[in-house]
Image (spheres, rainbow, N blue to C red):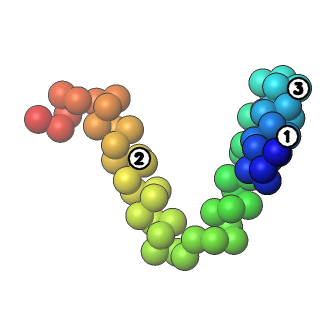
Amino acid sequence: MTRLEKLERYVDAVVQDMDWKTMYEYIYVSLLYDLEHSTTDEELDELYNEYFEDNENQLNPKDNE
């Protein structure tokens, strides 16, 4: 079994054993940690603006005409 196969099998097993609350908490903490430690302020501003502009456009399509 290759390293990648072992990693994928392990990750799949861990995820399969999580309930939704645990999965949400894990994803939240992982994203927060990753963004805090691996993005610059400029990158964060770009991510933030892109995400919220795209979502606003989807929620209020008439406002953007």
Q: Which residue is mark 1?
A: 10
- Residue 51 located left or right of residue 20: left
Q: Nearer the viewer, residue 39 or 49?
A: 39
Quadrant in the picture for residue 58: top left
Q: How far, Cα to Cα, is label 2 from label 3?
A: 32 Å
At horizontal 79% and vertical 53% (from top left) the residue drawn is: 3
Q: How far, Cα to Cα, is label 1 from label 3?
A: 11 Å
The kind of residue on which mark 1 rests is Tyr
At horizontal 78% and vertical 24% (from top left) the residue drawn is: 20
- Residue 6 located left or right of residue 33: right
The kind of residue on which mark 2 rests is Phe
Q: Earlier in the sequence, mark 2 or mark 3?
A: 3
- Residue 60: mark: none
Q: Mark 1 or 3, which is nearer the eye?
A: 1
Can residue 48 be seen at all in this image of the molecule?
yes
At horizontal 51% and vertical 66% (from top left) the residue drawn is: 44
Q: Earlier in the sequence, mark 1 or mark 3?
A: 1
At horizontal 68% and vertical 67% (from top left) the residue drawn is: 36
Asked if labels 1 and 2 touch by Cβ distance under 8 angstroms, the answer is: no
> In what element is the residue under mark 3?
loop
Q: Earlier in the sequence, mark 2 or mark 1?
A: 1
Q: Which residue is mark 2?
A: 52
Q: Say which quadrant the N terminus sits in.
A: top right
Q: Nearer the viewer, residue 10 or 36?
A: 10
Can residue 26 be seen at all in this image of the molecule?
no
